[in-house]
Amino acid sequence: MTDEYLFISDCHLDASRPEVTDALTVFLQQQASTAHCLYILGDLFEVWLGDDATFELSPILAALQQIAKNTEVYFIAGNRDFLLGENFATQAGLSIVTEPLSIELGGQAVLLIHGDSLCTDDHDYQEFRKMVRDPLWQSTFLSKPLTERQQIAAQLRQDSVAAMAQKSMQIMDVNQQAVDACFRTQSVDIIVHGHTHRPAIHRYPDNNTRYVLGDWNPGPSYLSWREDQGFKLVDSRVP
Ligand code: MN
């Protein structure tokens, strides 16, 4: 066991991309099994239609159950898997936590979020987010038969793809004022998030740093923290 903290997001696990499932399974079995904590910052799954929906995740579930014996695993919902519930969490041995989550590492305050809340230029998306994060909308959706949930999800996805094609890259990135406000109102030194699929380390005045986790296509992307090392972003796209 080490004092390592690991952070991942945006694996978008899906039956159509078995190589990502394989890469994550290896990551869980190797890096994560000896870590103190693993934080999953959303969009672990490409889509989550309820804990009763079948999905070919047996290797991931087995790997999560295995590491949960030694490693604390936390999950923050993304915009794809916000319906992941307590049934699955209990089965997988992870704890669902709500964002924003603030933790302390090496004397620094670190804020953990999925990242979509910072994309404030995308007004349509923020409206959509408000709708689907409403507990009443969620319970109504989850009470529908699975086939109906699949149809609704497919329609929402189609609408989203069509809308994204019309939006500029800038609109879909974080808004800098929202980032500044987040550092200020949450009184943190560091923000860690995913969602934008633009892995990077952004350094700001006052020693503030924003680590952006990448998606897992083409390969693993994770942030590591250890007392003797500090933060290290591991991603083939970041020097
Ligand atoms: Mn996302």
Image (cartoon, rainbow, N blue to C red):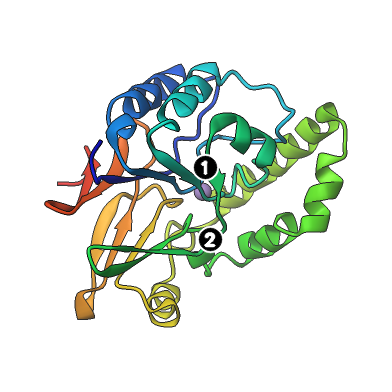
Q: Which of marks 1 and 2 is nearer the N terminus?
A: 1
Q: In the rendered image, is residue 231 in sight?
A: no
- Which residue in the protein does label 1 denote? 43
The amino acid type, in three-letter code, at marker 2 is: Glu
62, 44: nearer the viewer = 62
Q: Is residue 127 left or right of residue 185?
A: right
Residue that appears at 32% across and 43% down: 36
33, 85: nearer the viewer = 33
Query: Residue 33's image quarter?
Result: top left
Q: In which quarter of the image is the N terminus?
A: top left
215, 50: nearer the viewer = 50
- Residue 22: x and y in percent read 39, 19
- Which residue in the protein does label 2 denote? 99
Label 1 CB, ligand 1: below 8 Å? yes
Residue that appears at 28% across and 25% down: 30
Q: Distance between the residues labelled 1 and 2?
A: 14 Å
